[in-house]
Image: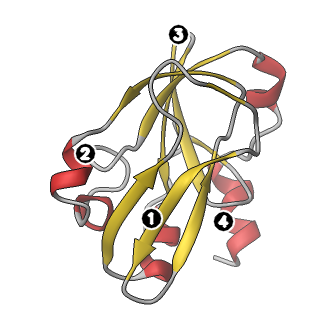
Amino acid sequence: MKFPASLKFTKEHEWIKLNDNICTVGVTDYAQGELGDIIYLDITSGVGNEVKQGESIGSIEAVKTVSEIYSPVSGKIIELNNSINDNPSIVNTDPYEEGWIVKIEYSNMDEINNLLDSEAYKILIGV
């Protein structure tokens, strides 16, 4: 399992990568492993929609279960990863690069400062 030190993590198992005022968001390597084979992603918040930290932005369906995806920050969705619609298993094979889900232009830096670093996330999941 990978826990890149350059990322921030949520207690709900999403990750974010910061690039200026844009956050790339996905589900963690741990989460995809727990879910199993991912077969479908339903992102209900589209480009241009405002989201709030902790709000559901869609769901992820795997063979085992369906789980909500939560926004790690408040802001505006500026891009969806449409390639995961054609190949949802990319979230299993490359969760931190090609398997990203949305990009959000965040509106509150304090929310990012309250997310977990990789060491705190490892403690959360017991690794």
Amino acid type, label 3:
Asp
- Which comes before the other along the chain, label 2 or label 4? 2
Q: Which mark is drawn over residue 29?
A: 1
Density class for disc 1 (Cα within 10 Å; few <14, some 14-19, many ≥20) is: many
**Quadrant where the image shows the C terminus:** bottom right
What whole-number distance in Å separates the C-alpha atoms at marks 3 and 4?
Answer: 26 Å
Q: Which mark is drawn over residue 20?
A: 3
What whole-number distance in Å separates the C-alpha atoms at marks 2 and 4?
Answer: 22 Å
**Quadrant where the image shows the N terminus:** bottom left
Decide which of 86, 127 is in the foreground and name it: 86
Residue labelled with disc 4: 122
Amino acid type, label 2:
Glu
What whole-number distance in Å separates the C-alpha atoms at marks 2 and 1?
Answer: 13 Å
Q: Is residue 67 above or below residue 48?
A: below
- Which comes before the other along the chain, label 2 or label 3? 3
- Which comes before the other along the chain, label 2 or label 1? 1
- Residue at the (53%, 10%) spot, across then down: 20
- Which comes before the other along the chain, label 3 or label 4? 3
- Horizontal arrangement in the rendering, residue 22 relative to residue 82 (left or right): right
What whole-number distance in Å separates the C-alpha atoms at marks 2 and 3?
Answer: 20 Å
